[in-house]
Amino acid sequence: MIVECAADVDPRTIQRLVEHLQAQGKLVHWVHGPQPVLICPDADDLDPRELQAWPGVRRVVPVRHAFQLAARDYRPEGTQIRIGEVLVGGEEPVLIAGPCAIESRSQLLETAHAVREAGAHMLRAGAFKPRTSPYSFQGLGFEGLELLAEARAETGLPVVTEVMSPEEVPLVAEVADVLQVGARNMQNFSLLKAVGRQPKPVLLKRGMSATIEEWLLAAEYVMAYGNFNVILCERGIRTFERATRNTLDINAVPVVKRLSHLPVLVDPSHGTGEAAYVIPIARAAIAAGADGLLTEVHVRPEEAWSDGRQSLTPEAFARMVREVRAVAQALRAVQCV
Ligand code: PEP
Ligand code: MN
């Protein structure tokens, strides 16, 4: 059960309510979000009307899932997240594009200009790379962040970049407009708490073996520590299928839309692992109701230091943009009749 208080309520009033709930043997988690919220996870037997009558209580929302703040019941109208001039969760699909990793100043700037020209709304690029082998390129680290800041200044595109450890959150958040938590870190609870304690929006990728409930509980961690600006990203899961790098779970899009109010993006690059499949899956994602796409683009994919095989050229990305816009437009047209 979610007990939402008014933003200006005296903390002593909230404390009295916490003690009242604890006296009934309830667990209470006090969330210091945009407004104070109390989460009472096992409160099916409590009377919402009694809690509603407490001073300072704005609304009481019973939720029948393990995740609470991430549940659709909390915000039936859906969540929109503003990042500069970009609106995630609005009418228009948000297109985030760029290289898997920042390799050099020229590679990043060339790609950033190319994706902006093609219609991208935000730039993605990794400075800290979670690589399966310790001998693979690990990213340029802080030097990469400086290049990312330069790319944003030159193109005006907000930037999305991955953060891998709680200690690095403050420094990455100084540059990033959106902090990416990668698939391999989806259940790194210390990291989830750390990105939850700061205000920059968080792009939370689905773990490669995570159920949708586990993924939404990971989003719940970020929200429970005060940051309600969470963007989900389906990036494919591990199945028996070997023809593609992962199996993009297209089902996840309508399922998450029903279970949660958070915006959902799709990453057709990691979802397929192969540039030739990226555009059809991007179209399918928008048709299924995704709020946008996270796509890897490289000026010379054959020379990329990571994920070149699944990276689109700028020309192919421009085609993807035209095609997904046509899908979005067609959907709006049929939804109007
Ligand atoms: C990435 O976006 O480059 C990345 C490493 O993605 P994932 O965490 O989904 O594997
Ligand atoms: Mn990648």
Image: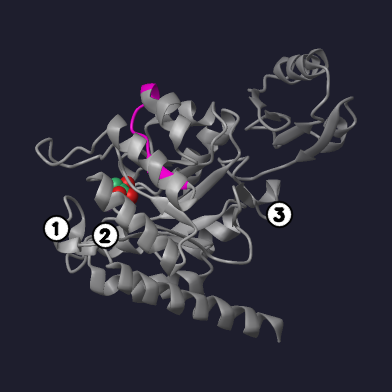
Q: Residues within 10 Å of mark 2 (few under 14, many from 20)?
A: many
Q: Residues within 10 Å of mark 1 (few under 14, many from 20)?
A: few
- Residue 128 on image: x %, y %: 29, 36
Whole-angstrom CA distance, mark 3 to mark 1, is 46 Å
Residue furthest to the left in view is 135
Residue linked to disc 2: 298
Q: What residue type is labelled 2?
A: His
- Residue 335 on image: x %, y %: 66, 80
Q: Do the residues labelled 2 and 3 touch (CB within 8 Å)?
A: no
Residue linked to disc 1: 303
Q: Residues within 10 Å of mark 3 (few under 14, many from 20)?
A: few
User: Which-is-in-front pick, marks 3 and 1?
Assistant: 1
Q: Are marks 3 and 1 in contact (CB under 8 Å)?
A: no
Residue linked to disc 3: 76
Q: Do the residues labelled 1 and 2 touch (CB within 8 Å)?
A: yes
- Residue 51 on image: x %, y %: 83, 30
Q: Which amino acid does label 3 sit on?
A: Pro
Q: Is residue 165 in the magenta section?
A: yes
Residue 100 visible in the displayed image: no
Residue placed at 56% from the left, 28% from the top? 225
Residue placed at 26% from the left, 40% from the top? 129
